[in-house]
Image (cartoon, helix red, strand yellow):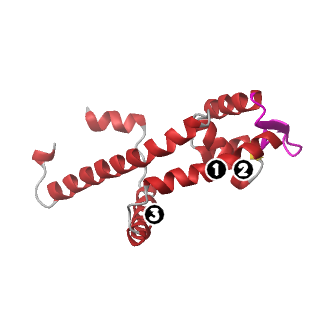
Amino acid sequence: MLGELTFPDRRIAELDLKLWTVLAKAYDAVRAHAFADIEQHGLTPGEFGVLDTLFHKGPMLLGELQHRVLVTSGGISFLTARLETRGLVERREYPADRRTKQVALTAEGEALMQRVFPEHTAAISRALAGVDPAVKEAALSLLRTIGRTVATVPVPSPEARGRQTG
């Protein structure tokens, strides 16, 4: 495929692939530290994502929580059920729409996050301690630009993807 492209198209495609690889490797390096800390507290990354979101944003509808945690509707139901069994969250009736539920931290979930979140922040800060603050600021700006730009590109449907490869 790359061999069929001409310069500068080939150069841009190579650059795109390199960027994707570097992004993935950087994410993996930081993720390893973050996930190790999360698991040390007896939580899965998905469970921590739910608790973290509720800790910082407050109670929210199950669908909104699903959107923020970036899991499927089945995944958010599974995660909230597990956390509810552990007494860390509660699902409440939502008077405005009886078909949905609101999810909130329990007092036990709030206490856990009050203790765990500062430790989690410290673990990530230790992982990134060797990166100059100016580099972090530049990376934030650049990654926001990349994210916003890529978000404007439509993702092909499964049918369209099949036509592209066939």
What amino acid is labelled 3 in the image?
Answer: Arg
Residue 144: x percent and y percent? 45, 63
What amino acid is labelled 2 in the image?
Answer: Gln
- Mark seen at residue 114: 2
Q: Are marks 2 and 1 in contact (CB under 8 Å)?
A: yes
To which quarter of the image does residue 45 belong? top right
Q: Earlier in the sequence, mark 3 or mark 1?
A: 1
Q: Are marks 3 and 2 in contact (CB under 8 Å)?
A: no
Distance from Cα at disc 3 to Cα at disc 1: 24 Å
- Neighbours of disc 2 within 10 Å: few (<14), some (14-19), many (20+): few
Report the front residue among 77 and 99.
77
Residue 21: x percent and y percent? 29, 48
Residue 55: x percent and y percent? 71, 50
Quick check: can you spot residue 111?
yes
Magenta segment range? Answer: 86-105
Q: Are marks 3 and 1 in contact (CB under 8 Å)?
A: no
- The answer to whether residue 117 is above or below residue 7 is above
To which quarter of the image does residue 133 belong? bottom left
Residue that mark 1 sits on:
117
Residue that mark 3 sits on:
144
Mark nearest the camera among 3 and 2 is 2
Q: Quadrant of the C terminus?
A: top left
Q: Quadrant of the N terminus?
A: top left
Q: Residue at x 31, y 50 (%)?
A: 20
Q: Give the structural element (helix, strand or loop) at label 2.
A: helix
Horizontal side of residue 135 vs 12, given as left or right: right
- The answer to whether residue 152 is above or below residue 63 is below
